[in-house]
Amino acid sequence: MTAVLSRTERVAENLNTALHELFARDATAYLLGEDVDDPYGGAFKVTRGLSTRYPDRVLSTPLSEGGIVGVAGGLALAGDTAIVEIMFSDFVALAFDQILNFATKSVSMYGTTVPMRLLVRCPTGGGRSYGPTHSQSLQKHFVGIPHLSLFEVSPFRDNGAVLGQALATGEPSVLFEDKILYTQRMYRDGVVDDLFRYDLTDDGTARVYVDDQDEFDCVLIAPGGLTQRVVAAARSLLLEDEITCLVLVPSRLYPFDLGPLLPVLARTRLVCVAEESTEGGTWGAQVAHQVHAELWDSLAKPVRLIHSADRVVPTAAHLERHVLVQADDIHRAVRKVVTGD
């Protein structure tokens, strides 16, 4: 059976609209990054049209991620809103010091709370044969930094709401935008395809379910970039193995608020968390820890973590697929958790 998707704007277009709306309502908003000016409009065209409409507030920069985030941090410290586009999230490692030791610490290290409206956008992940230094998912390296929030784009939640929530924290945030989502369509009207429906919780987490969201064998939690893979896995599990999954796709990865999800999690004894990063100190491990702490007495098994292979990401497409977590990997892991096979 072929999935029939609800059709609407593409994720990159939705992000572009969100940025235009932000700039229209916030005269203090600046955007900095490499090649973000028109006519190029950014490597993935997310900033298209911004420099034409707001030429004094969209700044194409030299190739220096530390410098870009440093300047943006200074703008935020002065009271402005600063958006940074890192061309590929792999290079945000070059700005790690500015995020860790300047931007996040500035919130509280001066003896009073200082709002820091800084958002670092990171096109992330593999699946496009960009090779070892342009395909990584580095979310885990930013988990646990005080005063730093992590968000991830998904096709479920409008990015205007994501940007609004991130900036409303008054603290620096990193927004991970999985590159394979850019050309995919946003979901709408609660419809994923011919089998699956979804709704959004108050905190922006998408709940994807079949028919009845109260009846399922396993809860599968994954960030937005894995949406297509986890939905495909849930579909094949249902049609081939008669295993029903409730899929949860949070918008805010860290700090991760488990509270709103506890009522639904309490109705299952089996939980899996999938992510594209390699294992070890991951966002998924943090989620598993929180689930264990709250629900250990009712879980039948420990939370199962599903990761990509512990290797660099190859350029060749067929090799890349072997390294990065795929729908089939998620299917096998969930089936083993549920059936033991």
Image (cartoon, rainbow, N blue to C red):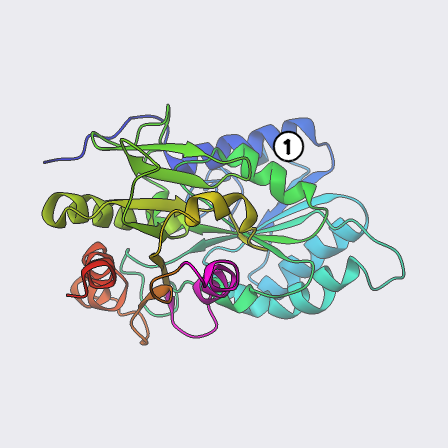
Residue beneath disc 1: 23
What percent of the width, then of the height, locates residue 14?
45, 32
SS assignment at label 1 = helix
Q: Amino acid at mark 1?
A: Phe
Residue 278 is covered by the magenta coloring: yes
Magenta highlight range: 277-298
18 or 283: which is nearer to us? 283
* Side of 33 relative to 87 (left or right): right
Residue furthest to the top in view is 189
Name the residue at 25% across, 69% down: 323
What percent of the width, then of the height, locates residue 81?
71, 43
What percent of the width, then of the height, locates residue 198?
36, 33
Q: Residues within 10 Å of mark 1 (few under 14, many from 20)?
A: many
From what the image shows, is residue 275 above or below residue 229?
A: below
Name the residue at 62% across, 32% down: 22
Q: Judge whether residue 92 can be spotted in this image.
A: yes
Q: Give the quarter of the figure containing the N terminus.
A: top left
